[in-house]
Amino acid sequence: MKFRDGHEHRPIEVAVENDNVDRALRALKRKMANEGVYKELKKRKFYLKPSEQKKRKMREAERRRRKAIRSRVRKANDR
């Protein structure tokens, strides 16, 4: 299924084996965290004006760019 943002979304599924619901619940929470569901919920909790959204996206992009540079530098120093 495709949504407005262009990403394809599919339901998160977890199998319950041997009636172990606690293990399945932990697996579900882990999958939701890895998929970014909690981050998305936190982001949508409050309305952001378009100008604030743009600023947040720019800050996040800058943070990712700096992180990529740091990892490249570390890899170059390890050689």
Image (spheres, rainbow, N blue to C red):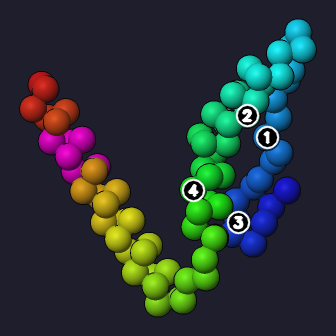
Real-space CA distance between mark 4 and mark 2, rounded to the nearest whole angstrom: 15 Å
Residue located farthest toward the top when viewing the structure as drawn: 18
Give neighbour class at mark 2: few <14, some 14-19, many 20+ (Cα, 10 Å). Answer: some
Q: Which residue is mark 3?
A: 6
Mark 4 or 1, which is nearer the eye? 4
> Which label's residue is closer to the chain start, 3 or 2?
3
Circle 1: residue type: Ile
The magenta segment: 68-73
> Which label's residue is closer to the chain start, 4 or 1?
1
Residue pictured at 53% horizontal, 89% vertical: 50
Circles 2 and 1, Cβ within 8 Å, touching? The answer is: yes
Give neighbour class at mark 4: few <14, some 14-19, many 20+ (Cα, 10 Å). Answer: few
Residue pictured at 76% horizontal, 30% vertical: 25
Circles 4 and 1, Cβ within 8 Å, touching? The answer is: no
Front in this rendered view, residue 77 or 54: 54
> Which label's residue is closer to the chain start, 3 or 4?
3
Asked if residue 72 is among those painted magenta in the image, a careful observer would answer yes
Image quadrant containing the N terminus: bottom right
Q: Position of residue 21 (x, y in %)?
A: 83, 22
Real-space CA distance between mark 3 and mark 2, rounded to the nearest whole angstrom: 24 Å
Q: Which residue is mark 2?
A: 28
Q: Position of residue 79 (x, y in %)?
A: 12, 25
Circle 4: residue type: Lys
> Which label's residue is closer to the chain start, 4 or 2?
2
- Residue 26 picture quarter: top right
Mark 2 or 1, which is nearer the eye? 2
Q: Which residue is mark 4?
A: 39
Q: Does residue 1 sit above or below 54 in this rendering? A: above
Label 3: element kind: loop
